[in-house]
Amino acid sequence: MRDMIVMVFVTLTFLMRVGEAKHNAYCDGNHCLAFFQDPVAFATAQKHCESNNGQLMTVRSSESQYMISILIEITGDYWIGLRLPSGQCPNSASDLRGYRWITGDNSTDFQNWGVIDNVCTSKCVSVSKIDFKWTEQSCYREIDGYLCEYNFPSVCKRIDIKSEESVLYETPFGFEGDDLLVLPMGSTATLNPLDSKYICLSEQWMQAPWTCDVLKGGCEDECLSINQQPVCICPPGKILHDNKFTCVAVQNDPCLHFGCAHVCYQKNDSSVACMCHHGYALAEDGKKCQNGFKMMNDVCIDEDECYMDGPCEHICENTLGSYNCSCFEGYIATRKDPNKCQLHCPFEECLAECDPNDPHQCNCPEGYLIDVRNEIRFCMDINECDNGYCEHNCKNTYGGHMCSCYEGFDLVDGWKCVESQPSEGSGFTTSSDFITPSVKYPTQRPSTVTAGGLIGIIVCIVIVVLVMVFLLQHILKRRRKLEVPSAPKTQGDDGHDLEQVRTEKYPKPSMDRNFKQDT
């Protein structure tokens, strides 16, 4: 059985080179693993994995450890997704020694520790080809590479081709190969000599041009939706190839002199026509473009973009010649596309957005985790600063974090701090009076001191002052008593002493009584 697993894994394994960096990967069902020989620190390695919707690899079983031995073909140290949280110490009583996976949990059926230093500082774990032991490293050290893992909701089988044909596959995490057996969703396949292109979507291959929202529809230059169909557009001086997605240069391009204001494209009957970019309407002459208007009976009429195309994901408000998009409560516009909306929480915790038909299916904004309390699901802000994402200073924000450096250092790659370089000819290192942080998410934490908290602080201060005044008064009274002169007492002196000690608050019958006895 083990030999069969080895044979399958070796068959699925493929290689590519990007510059001088070597990479290795394989997919098994909906799960893909990738090895990158790219010298980076732990946080940068995790960000590279996340950029392709993955994470650093978790090695929870002996099978996962065996997969590493197949992937790594080069001597060196490579990050896996295991680290010791900041401020904690190693714990030899647990399997993971107090470390946690990049997912935040510590569940495992496997461990392969090497020598461990009982040092209470943030550490991350690497493996090497020599013995594949788990080795502690400084999280800020740039070692030889890292291992990522990806999970995809669906995959496609390889395309059946004839003996005279060839196919080149490219995965969404940057690997190419011609002998893959399973392809994750988003992979593309280019066939030759038919010169056709396909993409894996919903467990099936779709030929280019597909929807313009995904990889420009597979078009070489530009993709536009014409009559609700994706069409590839070529720049002036080129026409669309018969494959419908690449452009070829021509000497007599009919679009060069056709006079389109925005875009000229070739129709199925080889004739050409004009169209306008989003937000513009094609004028009556079929060539000019008007901003948000259309010609009707020789009169420019505002075009209701909200009714025609529905460009906004949530709320669309038509304006004269244009439109405005806004989002429902609990959402904000995305940075890349103001027409799209994403979940947003401006506080440390918010109610999760759950499916009314399935309360267990809930979503949180990026940078938040679901927390269940009394069967109610909340979105709790993740404190990224606990994960060692910044080399010097880290400030947690709602949904993100900010990195900054000590004076005399510059921020690099959003988290790393390097010593500032001296200015040319100055002979000394310059420093800035302020630190420019790298902001992952700009929402800042408001002050945690509320009005009630401020009143409580004032009350405590008043109580402390009153107690100190009372103690001081008590000490002074005791001191005055101790300073009263003492002498040997006689019976006659006794009444005199009583007169000195008593005040006007007390009657003096004892004094009169003594006088009567003397007479």
Image (tube, grey):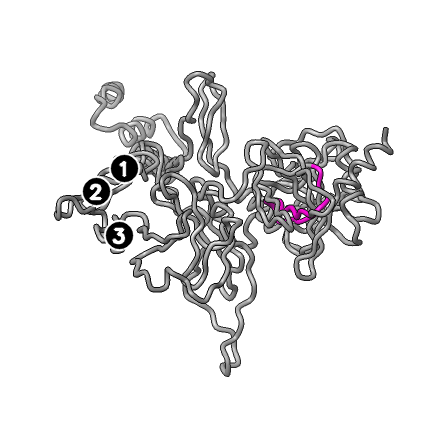
Identify the secondary structure beneath mark 3.
loop
Identify the secondary structure beneath mark 1.
helix
Res 478 quadrant in image: top left
Residue located beneath label 2 in the image:
303
Comes first in the chain, label 1 or label 2: 2
Query: What label sits on residue 186 in the rendered view?
Result: none
Distance between mark 1 and mark 2 Cα atoms: 8 Å
The stretch of residues the image draws in magenta is 166-181
Task: Check if residue 74 falls in the magenta segment.
Answer: no
Residue located beneath label 3 in the image:
286
Front of the two marks 3 and 2: 3
Residue located beneath label 1 in the image:
308
Q: Residue furthest bottom?
A: 425
Crowd class of label 2 (few under 14; some 14 to 19; many from 20; radius 10 Å)? many
Distance between mark 3 and mark 1 Cα atoms: 19 Å
| Viewer-nearest residue: 311 or 337 | 311
Kind of residue at disc 1: Met
